[in-house]
């Protein structure tokens, strides 16, 4: 099942309290692909994601969904197409997994109606995809970090959007869970054709899992393309201000960044 | 030091004003004569029976409230943690009213009960708020809850009170210098003469306690003993002052921040805070007596003056992140 | 136990307790009534004996304590939901005191007399105080944290009650019958003021029920709620308005009754979890139960006089505040 929703960022300038963070960004989100936004801290990655998700109004430019500005959509309508998992959502005290996931069905609910059969089916499917059906009646505060993150993604899945934005979905997780979450998102993308856009910190995992990469530096888009097109020593130097070697990842064949600090660098590797 | 002198001068002039002013204004000479034992018709009653106890109780109670409040605030490192806000005063009052009404006690026994009530309340709040990391915000929330409970208990006691006990009980509820008698003064004076030097001497240790438990221990301060002594002398002073004038709203809370502004933050603050407390009470009493067509008791005036300051302080603390 | 079973059992137990409380509220007081007289007066409409007349007189008070408790329970649940703050409540936020002050000012300076005038002033006072307190509490880093809101609320409340005292003191002859403007009590309710507040309460109840799914989304944070299609600003404004209307209307009749809105939603969340579609109606049920029980307790404890129900609810509810404070980790304050 593929979806055709075209999401475009057209000359966005945005920021907070008069401080400009994003400067004239123009990009088109690849449909049915996994895209990753890379960049150093405070380069505007999260701000870009928030602007796309309509959490932040750009001071100029616009975001369009299928050619129409996203601010012109009724909010529930947009919420059925575009989902976002923020970096630190609030956990209501004592909530159980099934309840939390079912809250993702909000955009489909009428004013007075409870959950429909369709809603229940969507929740069950989301739990299934994330492999947490057995946790449905557990309280969220009893779960491990990796399990919690699966629950949140399941909630975003229950929202059943064709486009899913995730702000650092793997931060604070052990490496095992990071890989697991990225695998699950890849499953989702392959099975349902969901367009995924996420901010990640780990360059190497990004290079492995992304179909497409956007690299930001100080609020400007400096490069975009497939990982092997984009990730090279010059770009890493430009974006992160760090020397490195880029090799081919022996596991996946994607680019692999080896940082070069001031110590522990063999003479043969000094440029 | 100059601040202390200026405050002392302010206290003295307010004391003089209270002695001179009233329904009839007497000359300083006349007041002096009455005080030194001469009998002047009319003036003797007004000065000795009405104005002298009024002045002395305002002075002493204000000093006690101010110093004790400032001690709590410094010790708990939070300007909101004054005994009248976190429920310590309410604990004293509840104990006093309980002894008055249910046990038919009076006089010093009630005051001692009030001390015990205040100490127990402090200990209760402090123990509950400790739980692992010491947390100022939590302490105040707990204090607010404790205070609400104690006030409910007091309401219950008042309802149960026999008619003739009610006026005595109300003394513990609303701050006023009316009706204080000269015979009430010596006890309060003795308490303050004993406990304010202790507070001032321990103030040095308190400055180090402010740096935090670990630094204080490293610098050789016996933290628990210092805390217990300070809490005791603060609660004792407040209990006896309240027994004389009733709780005068916000004086404990206001004096510390005002005096630390005057002397500069981090400087030893106990004596100036006591003087500021006396200034506040005496000034508010004058305002209550003469500024309006109705005479307001001093507690109402300090309540109205103190409340906006409390809100102002909150706004500032929130902006600088002090409360969270 | 399944969630729906838990809700059902809690509801049944609460309703049984409410029925007992209704009977108690009609029968108990300075003049107690035998069960026989109670049944005669209620179901046979007799008003011959003194006991039967007493029962009739107690009906409006009982009805009012039920709806007032329900309104305060929902009001607290609404305020907790829109601020995502477990200790938000009309009394902790000072909203009740604000309503009380405006009514007292109206009595003292504007010579107001009708129930309608009381209600308008109370609502105005409640709304202004709510905005003021939330404004102070949300200053600075971290927004409206529980501790900042509670401090702003209790400071404001202390300030406002100083003004209430100052206004009432010189007019003690006029105000003696109005001690409940300082501590709330349901004893002054009658059919006229019940009829006057009822439409407001119904509107408040309806809004709270309709808003519940939106509040469920908002419980996940403003960002998440926006992503799910909630206009958080509008939802918050409507919720606040409903909460203020509910507690303001009750304060106009009964004075400031504290802590019902704090403890009832808290207990319901502990028992039944965080789903607002359940919390809202169950807070109404629990609030009705608690306030009616508090009123009865006040009559028994105060016999031959009466202890204001606001005193009893404070005694019951303040420990909940203490427990929340003790339980909460430093970071969440």
Image (spheres, coloured by chain):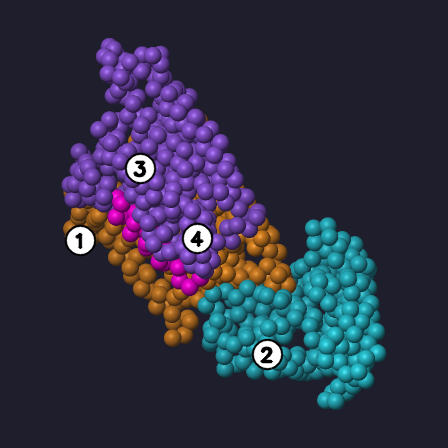
Q: Colour of chain B?
A: purple
Q: How many marks?
A: 4
Crowd class of label 3 (few under 14; some 14 to 19; many from 20; radius 10 Å): many
Choose mark 2 or mark 1, whichever is in front: 2
Quick one: B125 or B231, which is closer to the camera? B231
Magenta stretch holds residue C306: no
Separation of disc 4 and disc 1 at Cα? 64 Å
Secondary structure of the residue carrying numbered label 1: helix
Q: Do callouts 2 and 1 mark residues in contact (Cβ within 8 Å)?
A: no
**Along the line of sight, which residue is nearer the eye, C239 or C66?**
C239
**Pair 4/2: label in front:** 4
Q: Where does residue C55 sit, x and y in percent of width and height? A: 23, 46
Pointer 3: what residue?
A: B192
Q: Which residue is mark 1?
A: C35
Magenta stretch holds residue B115: yes
Whether labels 4 and 2 share one chain: no
Q: Which residues are magenta?
A: B114-134
Which chain is painted in cyan?
A
Magenta segment's dominant SS is helix
Q: Colour of chain C?
A: orange
Give the residue number, with chain letter if any, for mark 4: B209
Of the numbered discs 3 and 4, the one sitting upstream in the chain is: 3
Q: Residue at x 49, y 42 (%)?
A: B267
Label 1 lies in what chain? C
Residue B41 is at least partly visible in this image: yes
Q: Nearer the viewer, mark 3 or mark 1?
A: 3
The residue sitting at the front extreme is B220
Q: Say yes or no: labels 3 and 4 on the same chain.
A: yes
Determine contact: label 3, label 1, CB under 8 Å.
no
């Amino acid at each position: 099942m593929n979806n055709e929703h075209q999401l475009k960022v057209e000359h966005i300038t945005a920021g907070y309290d008069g401080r400009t963070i994003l400067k004239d960004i123009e990009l088109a989100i690849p449909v049915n692909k996994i895209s990753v936004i890379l960049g150093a801290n405070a380069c505007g990655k999260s701000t870009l994601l928030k602007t796309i998700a309509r959490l932040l109004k750009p001071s100029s430019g616009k975001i369009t969904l299928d050619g129409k500005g996203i601010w012109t959509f009724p909010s529930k309508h947009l919420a059925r197409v575009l989902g976002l998992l923020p970096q630190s959502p609030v956990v209501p005290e004592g909530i159980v997994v099934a309840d939390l996931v079912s809250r993702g069905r909000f955009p489909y609910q009428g004013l007075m109606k409870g959950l429909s059969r369709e809603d229940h089916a969507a929740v069950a499917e989301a739990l299934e995809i994330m492999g947490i059906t057995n946790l449905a009646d557990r309280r969220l505060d009893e779960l491990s970090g990796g399990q919690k993150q699966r629950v949140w993604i399941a909630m975003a899945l229950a929202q059943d959007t064709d486009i899913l934005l995730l702000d650092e979905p793997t931060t604070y997780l052990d490496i095992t869970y990071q890989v697991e979450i990225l695998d699950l998102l890849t499953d989702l993308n392959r099975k349902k054709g969901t367009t995924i856009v996420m901010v990640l910190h780990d360059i190497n995992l990004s290079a492995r899992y992304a179909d497409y990469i956007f690299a930001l530096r100080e609020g400007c888009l400096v490069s975009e393309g497939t990982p092997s097109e984009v990730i090279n020593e010059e770009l890493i130097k430009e974006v992160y201000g760090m020397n490195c070697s880029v090799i081919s990842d022996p596991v996946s064949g994607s680019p692999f960044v080896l940082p070069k600090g001031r110590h522990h660098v063999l003479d043969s590797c000094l440029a | 030091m100059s601040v202390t002198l200026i405050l002392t001068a302010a206290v003295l002039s307010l004391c003089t004003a209270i002695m001179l002013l009233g329904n009839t204004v007497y000359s300083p000479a006349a007041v002096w004569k009455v005080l030194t034992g001469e009998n002047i018709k009319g003036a003797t009653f007004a000065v000795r029976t009405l104005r002298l106890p009024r002045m002395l109780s305002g002075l002493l109670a204000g000093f006690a409230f101010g110093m004790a409040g400032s001690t709590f605030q410094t010790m708990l490192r939070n300007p909101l943690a004054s005994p009248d806000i976190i429920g310590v005063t309410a604990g004293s009052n509840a104990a006093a009213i309980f002894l008055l009404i249910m046990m038919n006690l009076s006089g010093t026994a009630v005051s001692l009960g009030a001390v015990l009530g205040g100490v127990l309340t402090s200990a209760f709040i402090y123990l509950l708020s400790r739980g692992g990391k010491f947390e100022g915000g939590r302490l105040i929330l707990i204090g607010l809850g404790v205070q609400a409970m104690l006030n409910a208990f007091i309401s219950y006691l008042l309802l149960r009170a026999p008619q003739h006990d009610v006026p005595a009980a109300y003394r513990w509820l609303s701050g006023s210098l009316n009706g204080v008698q000269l015979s009430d003064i010596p006890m309060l004076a003795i308490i303050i003469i004993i406990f304010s030097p202790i507070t001032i001497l321990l103030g040095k240790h308190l400055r180090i306690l402010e740096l935090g438990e670990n630094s204080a221990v490293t610098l050789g301060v016996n933290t628990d003993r210092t805390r217990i002594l300070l809490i005791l002398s603060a609660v004792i002073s407040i209990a006896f002052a309240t027994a004389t004038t009733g709780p005068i709203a916000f004086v404990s809370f206001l004096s510390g921040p005002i005096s630390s502004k005057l002397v500069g933050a981090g400087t030893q603050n106990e004596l100036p805070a006591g003087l500021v407390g006396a200034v506040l009470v005496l000034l508010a009493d004058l305002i209550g007596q003469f500024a309006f067509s109705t005479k307001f008791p001093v507690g109402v005036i300090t309540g109205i003056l103190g409340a906006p300051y409390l809100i102002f302080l909150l706004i500032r603390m929130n902006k600088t992140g002090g409360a969270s | 136990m399944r969630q729906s079973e838990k809700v059902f059992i809690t509801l049944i137990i609460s309703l049984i307790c409410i029925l007992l409380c209704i009977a108690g509220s009609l029968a108990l007081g300075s003049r107690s009534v035998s069960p026989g007289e109670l049944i005669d007066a209620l179901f046979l409409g007799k008003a011959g004996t003194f006991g039967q007349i007493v029962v009739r007189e107690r009906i409006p008070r009982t009805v009012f304590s039920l709806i007032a408790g329900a309104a305060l329970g929902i009001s607290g649940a609404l305020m907790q939901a829109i601020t995502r703050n477990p200790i938000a409540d009309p009394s902790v936020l000072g909203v009740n005191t604000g309503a009380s002050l405006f009514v007292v000012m109206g009595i003292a300076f504007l010579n107001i007399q009708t129930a309608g005038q009381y209600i308008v002033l109370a609502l105005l006072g409640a709304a202004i105080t709510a905005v003021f307190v939330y404004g102070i509490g949300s200053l600075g880093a971290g927004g409206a944290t529980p501790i900042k809101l509670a401090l702003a609320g209790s400071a404001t409340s202390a300030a406002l009650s100083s003004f209430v005292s100052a206004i009432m003191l010189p007019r003690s002859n006029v105000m003696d019958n109005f001690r409940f403007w300082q501590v709330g009590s349901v004893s002054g309710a009658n059919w006229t003021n019940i009829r006057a507040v009822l439409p407001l309460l119904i509107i408040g109840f309806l809004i709270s029920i309709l808003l519940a799914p939106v509040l469920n989304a908002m419980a996940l944070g403003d960002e998440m709620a926006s992503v799910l299609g909630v206009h958080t600003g509008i939802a918050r404004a409507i919720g606040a308005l409903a909460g203020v209307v509910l507690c303001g209307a009750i304060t106009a009749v009964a004075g400031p009754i504290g802590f019902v809105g704090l403890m009832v939603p808290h207990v319901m969340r502990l028992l039944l979890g965080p789903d607002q579609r359940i919390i809202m109606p169950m807070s109404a049920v629990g609030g009705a139960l608690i306030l009616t029980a508090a009123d009865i307790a006040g009559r028994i404890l105060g016999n031959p006089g009466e202890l204001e129900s606001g005193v009893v609810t404070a005694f019951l509810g303040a420990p909940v505040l203490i427990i929340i404070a003790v339980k909460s980790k430093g970071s969440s304050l």
